[in-house]
């Protein structure tokens, strides 16, 4: 399996379980983030799998190699904030 197919597979699994488990929105105020919550969780899983163990490293990895799959990557501070908001889910 190619890395691209692996990322897509992980995203599909994460999205399936996220939709099944999260029945009410986690955030109720402000604008919707650029990335969906399943995209952020997928990036964290794949980033850790690929050897990037920091939020900065994960974001740089996806900006460098997988921007076509994740074209709406936010600034690092937004990514970190959104990732930390997923603690209830992870």
Image: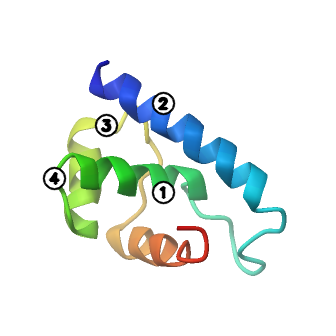
Which circle's residue, 3 or 4, is located before the other in the chain? Answer: 4
Q: Quadrant of the rendered structure where residue 26 is? A: bottom right
* Alpha carbon separation for disc pair 2 and 4: 18 Å
Residue 14 in picture, x, y percent from top left: 57, 46
* Helix, strand or loop for disc 4: loop
Q: Answer with the quarter of the image where residue 22 lies.
A: bottom right
Residue at image point 57% right, 39% down: 13
Q: Earlier in the sequence, mark 4 or mark 1?
A: 1
Image location of residue 34, percent across then percent down: 56, 57
At 29% from the left edge and 57% from the top edge, which residue is drawn?
Answer: 59
What whole-number distance in Å separates the C-alpha atoms at marks 3 and 4? 15 Å
**Looking at the image, is mark 3 or mark 1 nearer the viewer?**
1
Say which of marks 2 and 3 sits in front. Answer: 2
Residue receiving disc 2? 9
Which residue is farthest top? 1
- Which residue carries the number 4 mark? 51
Residue at 63%, 45% (x, y): give it.
15
């Amino acid at each position: 399996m190619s890395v691209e197919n692996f990322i897509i597979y992980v995203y599909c699994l994460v999205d399936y379980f996220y939709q099944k488990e999260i029945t009410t929105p986690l955030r109720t105020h402000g604008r919707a983030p650029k990335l969906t919550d399943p995209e952020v969780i997928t990036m964290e899983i794949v980033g850790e799998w690929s050897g990037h163990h920091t939020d900065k490293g994960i974001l740089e990895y996806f900006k460098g190699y997988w921007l076509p799959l994740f074209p709406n990557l936010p600034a690092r501070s937004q990514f970190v904030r959104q990732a930390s908001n997923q603690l209830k889910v992870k």
